[in-house]
Amino acid sequence: METFGVDRGGGGQLAAGAVGTIMQNTRFTNVANSFPLPASCLSLKKVSEVKDYYNSSRIPTATIQKSIEENDGLAPYVVSFSSRGPNPITRDILKLDLTALEAYILAAWSKATTMTKVEGDTRIVLYNIISGTSMSCPHAIAAAAYVKSFHPTWSPVAVKSALMTTDAEFAYGTGHINPTRAINPGLVYDAGEINYVNFLCGQGYSNRSLGLVIGDNSSCSQAKKPASHMNYPSFILSSMSKSVITSFFPRTVTNVGSLVSIYKAIVNAPTGLKVEVIPNVL
């Protein structure tokens, strides 16, 4: 007998011989998953309505309709559960700093496993749609490799700078990576090992802890530098104080664009914030 199940998952219904499943989902409205059965994820209210109908009807029926493709124009869009930061360890370094595609990515899928990995699901597919860090990492690495192919002498820091400074959506770090724009960033914020040593020392690292990170006999005997002095492509000042505060962000930029270039600083600061760039023309 063909049955429909009302449950939070599809594995049990598949084992029971169901042809479809209705599941309660009270978490996120912008999440999609693959299931071993045709499935509908409903809110708590909608699930209650389905149960009421099921209990009040002599012959309750349900119809599985074909899925339709819908483009709402929102992509790319950061999902609700994506972290907006800040960095709990060092609040004076902006995190997120880059955003890479990771939600609902169509990618090659191993034939050594099934579509959902649920027991009883025998479907073998060449491509699947999944989400997670395992999706964003290849995108970010490929973007970095793409930029590096145009600039083989650039350091990893310079490549990251180019990716960060060629898009701008503050709520998502510096925005979604744009490899085609990143190959020509104009200016890059580069940094060597000593910059990171000074930064870690400024964060309170002991010589022993520093050695574990750096892998040599570096010490914090030199002048310690605050996070604001890190040659980083973003600027952030974390404060809980309601009084007037000031901070200085020294930066060194390297021109990787035309030899005849002029860069002008344009500041659009919100009320109550004063920003001064010296010099304001390079």
Image (tube, rainbow, N blue to C red):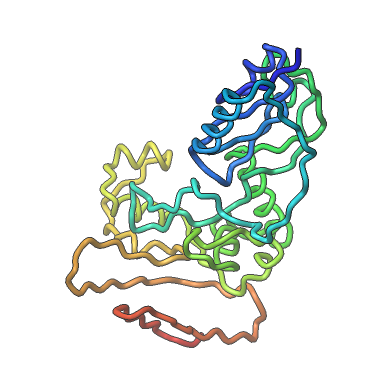
The residue positioned 39% from the left and 57% from the top of the image is 93
Q: Nearer the viewer, residue 14 or 159?
A: 14
In this view, 186 is above or below 182 = below
Residue 105 spot, x, y in % from top left: 69, 43
Q: Is residue 84 left or right of residue 38?
A: left
Indicate whether 89 appears above or below 9: below
- Where residue 11 sits, quadrant-wise, is top right
Q: Position of residue 262 (x, y in %)?
A: 58, 87
Give the mark count: 0
Q: Quadrant of residue 163?
A: bottom right
x%, y% of residue 37?
71, 25
In the rendered structure, the answer to whether residue 210 lies left or right of residue 42 reads left
Please report the residue visible at 69 percent of the width from the left and 22 percent of the height from the top.
59
Give the position of the N terminus as an image quadrant.
top right
Residue 167, position in %: x, y?
58, 67
Q: Nearer the viewer, residue 237 or 19?
A: 19
Q: To which quarter of the image does residue 144 belong?
A: bottom right
The residue at the far left in this view is 243
**What residue is shown at x 26% (from left), y 51% (from top)?**
221
Q: Residue at x 74, y 35 (%)?
A: 128
Image side of residue 96 versus residue 272, left or right: right
Q: Nearer the viewer, residue 59 or 138?
A: 59
Foreground: 93 or 24? 24
- Left or right? Give the position of 133 relative to 196: right
212 in relation to 273, above or below = above
